[in-house]
Amino acid sequence: MFKKTILAVTVMAGLSATVAQAHDMPPPAGPGMHGGWGARGGMEVLAGLKLTPAQHKQIHAILQAARKGKRDDWKQEGALHQQIRDLLLAPGPVDRAKLTSLTQQIETLHQADIDSRLDVAVKIHDVLTPAQLADAKVREDKIRSLRDQLDELTAPPPPPPGKGAPKDDDAE
């Protein structure tokens, strides 16, 4: 269930970022940047959609509202990570209770970020027409297929026979 939620959040966050910058897309990512949602957070999915000026305005307002307070969250998370590094680099035994508390605070920030991105994605979804959503789905499917093909082409070759793991006969 958690993986499906993360996937949905990732897809919709990519959609939200895409719509905001669909009219002035950066060039495609370079080699090695195809994994996951790429360097642009999935913006390529909606890059070619024809949005009305009203849709652009609505989506821009949604994204601006979502950005408020993000810098403070990033600073807070950075401070928590610094506290973890300080604990791990201090002489003597590590205070595991303090580590647990800090990691729980980071996880709380991450969950709030996921919830916020999902909220933004739902709001953007509601701005788009059914035809635009269908077009975005076609684009997403094609992008996913191309990424899968690229992953297959760039995967390391399997180890040659006899140089990998021991055979069943050798294990006895």
Image (cartoon, rainbow, N blue to C red):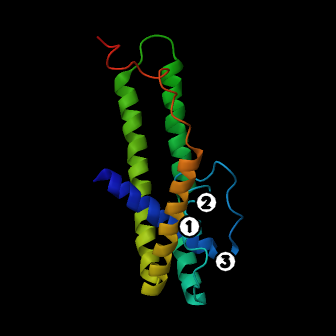
The residue that mark 1 highlights is 17
* Image position, residue 133 (x, y; %): 45, 79
Secondary element at image label 2: loop
Q: Decide: few, some or many residues near mark 2? Use Cα within 10 Å; few <14, some 14-19, many ≥20.
A: some
The residue that mark 2 highlights is 40
- Give me the residue at 70% from left, 53% from top: 30
Residue 23, numbered circle: 3
* Image position, residue 71 (x, y; %): 57, 54
As shown in the figure, which amino acid type bears the numbered disc 3?
Answer: His
User: Is label 2 in contact with label 1 (beta carbons under 8 Å)?
Assistant: yes
* Image position, residue 61 (x, y; %): 55, 77
**Which badge, 3 or 2, is on the more N-terminal residue?**
3
Q: Up-down: is 61 above or below 32?
A: below
As shown in the figure, which amino acid type bears the numbered disc 2?
Answer: Arg
Can residue 116 be seen in this snapshot? no
- Give me the residue at 48% from left, 25% from top: 161
Q: Decide: few, some or many residues near mark 3? Use Cα within 10 Å; few <14, some 14-19, many ≥20.
A: some
- Give me the residue at 40% from left, 36% from top: 103
